[in-house]
Amino acid sequence: MPEGHTIHRLASDYADRFTGTPTLVTSPQGKFSDAAGLLNGAELTRTEAHGKHLFLGFRDADWVHIHLGLFGKVDFGPAPAPPPADTVRLRLANATSYVDLRGPTTCALITDGEKRAVHERLGPDPLRQDADPGAAYARVRRSRTTIAALLMDQKVIAGVGNVYRAEVLFRHGIDPYRPGRDITPAEWDLIWTDLADLMREGVRLGRIDTVRPAHTPEAMGRPPRVDDHGGEVYVYRRADRPCHICGDEIRTAGLAARNLFWCPTCQRP
């Protein structure tokens, strides 16, 4: 599932290509046809991301709410648009560009009120200017749940996925099994600030890089990482490989239906 930086980047990409232009809106698959008919010819007026949720604004109060889920894909291309595949849920096209959305968990036309309800059920997003890290910490410090699980809970903090949670805990030497109530205010400030910085870099680069300059392949004389997620990381998907810092083997275990990765030496209880 894409992490929050990907959704913010998509919001920017949609805005750059379609804001302020009459847009052809279609649903070749047919599942969004009625809504597409209502929006066809309207201008995209604004885009917004909150965690893993993308919002495309048309006219004054119409929003397309998109959640990619596990299988959703977005593909941009230059005009003229080719004939669409019958798997395309939503296509936007104008005189210069087109974009196809396939396989999302959610693609729905919603009102301002329905959009507010989505925001209200999500935790603060480190990439949003209106984010309140204190609101997230208020949930964390009252919980016996592990910090690794809390970081993946979109009601606590929105946009963090499996890669960012594993990497930020490693970067600050925090045992992923520590209860949230044992995380100090100073530790939470470090976690939040680091997540915001890493995710902003993710938006800029289009991939997740979490290693510090001293631990890049060039600095350490090691081969670069080869993985379909791209980017250099400390622990994510590196089970049984040596830690870049201490040389101990990275471990993995299931936690909250996802694979957790950590270094037992650098992240001691």
Image (cartoon, grey):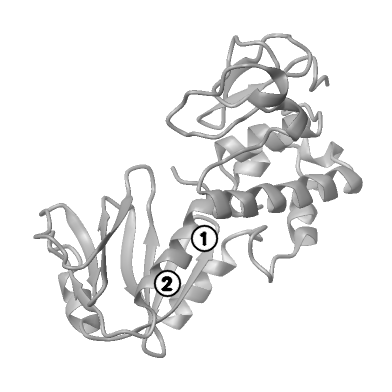
Residue that badge 1 annotates: 8
Marks 1 and 2, how far apart at CA = 12 Å
Which one is nearer the viewer's eye here, 145 or 244?
244
Quadrant assignment, res 191: top right
Q: Quarter of the image holding residue 247? A: top right
Quadrant for the N terminus in the image: top left
Are the two marked residues, 1 and 2, in contact with CB atoms closer than 8 angstroms? no
- The quadrant in which the C terminus is found is top right
For the residue marked with disc 2, what is the amino acid?
A: Asp
Q: Position of residue 199 (x, y in %)?
A: 63, 50
- Residue 16's label in the rendered image is 2
Between residue 186 and residue 197, name the one nearer to us: 197
Q: How many marks?
A: 2
Residue 147, labelled with which disc? none
Query: In x, y percent, where is residue 225?
Result: 54, 24
> What is the three-letter code of the residue carrying label 1?
His
* Residue at (66% x, 36% y) in the render: 210
Q: Secondary structure at mark 1?
A: helix
Task: Examine the rendered structure and indicate whether residue 249 appears above or below residue 4.
Answer: above
Asked if 153 appears above or below 261 in the picture, the reply is below
Residue at image point 62% right, 40% down: 164
Select label 1 or label 2 by which is in front: 2
